[in-house]
Image (spheres, rainbow, N blue to C red):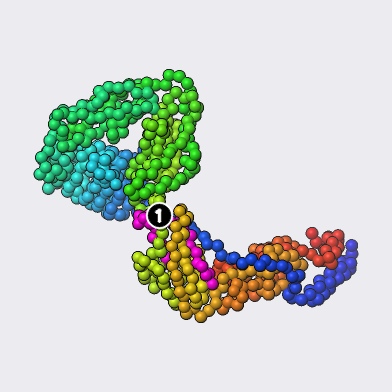
Amino acid sequence: MNKKVNIALSLLLALIMIFSVLSMPAAFALEALETSDEDFIVRDFVVEDDKETAAEDGTVNWSYTETDTEATVTYCDTSAETVTVPSVYRGKPVVAIAANAFDGTTGLANLKTVNIAATVQKIESNAFKNCTLLSAVNFLAFEGLTGDAAVPDITEICADAFYNCAALKAITVPKGVVTIGAHAFGFTYAASAYQLISGFVVSGYLNTAAYKYANDNAFAFSNLYGAEVVTPVQTFSVSPGQGTVNIGEFIQLTSVFGANTPTNTFVRWFSSDKTVAAVDKTGKVTGVSGGEVTITAISSDNLKTATCAITVNGPSSGSKVTAVEFTGNLAAPTVTAYYSTGSTTKYRITYVTTPADAPYDAVAFDYDNTYLNVEYDTTAKCYYLIPKKLTSGTDTVLLKIYSVAYPSTVFNMVNIKISDEIKGVQWYSFTANDGIPFIVTNLNAITWKANEGRLDFAVKLLPSNATATMDDIIISSSNENVAYWNNNNELVPLSDGVTILTVTTKNGGYTDTIKVTLSGTGSIAVLGLKFTLGETQEVTYSKSYDLSKYLEFNPKSPTNKKVTWKSSDESIISVTDKGVITCKKVGIAVITATSEENDEAVATVIITVTLAWWQKIIFFILRLFGFSN
């Protein structure tokens, strides 16, 4: 093709394109599209869970080691003055504080108080080495329990545990501690020698390890019995003195004292080999693997010991247990169990072991007994979960089921979310823009002026200790032309009038209402937007169209009609701030109009750009001669 032909074709194309643009109006008239007579809804009420904070004190850094069943604190670094050792790490109880975990020579310059979780059983040597400002050590009891059941699990405080903690002038030792190593506390170290801390006081119970440690080191001793007459432990044994148990089964041991019942009957239990048999704090011995083991009991008073010889019968026939899994409702990452004060609610635990013919398929459970308990019903021959406690809000506890025969390899876990059972709901308070809430016990009605802006709210669930997140309730306004709830859980004023607000619990369907009177708005707010074009529309390449004439407000004539326009693909369709679109190439784009006043009022239309018949002919000719793809 010669150059003249190319020029001629180009001029022809340009003239045709110019003519087509000039001959068409800037705005287009679409065929009338039928619209629905249904109410136009542009806003859905959305609720979200309150986000839980990651840690109580974000300035504390922790490190741990862990086994299948327990965890140990190995490192702590913080600039805080007070630290609380966590009771649980990744669903496992924290049972020990390792050597040098709190090393004052590498950090902890401000540490003054340490609260030790009730689950901690052992504090190793040099655990709190050179924490020079540390002045208070508190062993936390188990919450919600009383008497000996509340005694923390701490059993052993090793030698030099509080090495060179010069500011520590006193310590209270729980009655369950049966071993205190040399120079565990009450000493500084200088010039290659230990020095007694002047005026150091040990508080504890008479005849216990704390009493012995104080006497051995000439420390002052504060007797927690006070003036009470104490009957000491004279004789002490374990019943039965020996026993046999199969893998996965258990035998209950009890402590037996002499004729004169001692004041302090607290006993610690230990197994000589946990891989053969494990013993809990109550003396319950569970067979783990075939073999022999000695169970030792140590009395808190006078530190007397008694033993029991246990033989564990190992597997004899059948298949090895390869899996244990929760079933039914527990076969989920997280399930909810409701706790009610003053009543006991039980949940049956269902599970299966694989294969079914495994000889000793007994299971056991690991959990934080502060919040729940697992009991075996000898009549029903099944296990039950019983929620015990709720500290605040909801608590999620890891429940682990494992094969007693093979605990480290055969197990399954589920998160139990403990929540208070809701018995009712009440409106509680509203907060205006000045930030001052007005709270009443019987909230019947409020009068609200427009200049107070949007209102925050609070509801109270019944009983008084019941709690919920926004995901547990639904809030509605009977007249959304007066006021509505937005996604930030605020009441938004629209126009003068009266509306009834209703809060409804998803659990139980309990409701409460309040009458709200709004005055002084002086304007008509935007509730919603829609296009009268329908959801999709086909338009012609290279043309411009005014979409604003097809945009309808709800209500029809709001005070503020300003709209923000947006195209999903500016390379296909561009849009101006007045709603005029220009079709740049063949393709599909979504045009969105959003109310400037109410960002929840949104309208969209999907537009497809195509070629007119004459445009198709021209582009065909151009492609034929190599001018276009």
Mark 1 residue crowding within 10 angstroms, few (<14) / some (14–19) / many (20+): some
Specify the quadrant of the image occupied by residue 612. Answer: bottom right
Element carrying mark 1: loop
**Mark 1 sits on what residue?**
423
Q: Does 383 lie within the magenta span?
A: no
Q: Amino acid at mark 1?
A: Lys
Picture layout, residue 91 above or below residue 490: above
| In the displayed structure image, the side of residue 112 where residue 21 appears, left or right | right
| In the displayed structure image, the side of residue 62 where residue 138 appears, left or right | left
Q: Does 465 lie within the magenta span?
A: yes
Screen quadrant of the C terminus: bottom right
What residue appears at the point 50 percent right and 27 percent down from the top-left corner? 355
Picture layout, residue 236 above or below residue 84: above
Specify the quadrant of the image occupied by residue 316. Answer: top left
What residue appears at the point 42 percent right and 35 percent down from the top-left corner? 401
Write the start and end of the magenta stretch as one range: 456-481
Residue furthest to the top in view is: 316
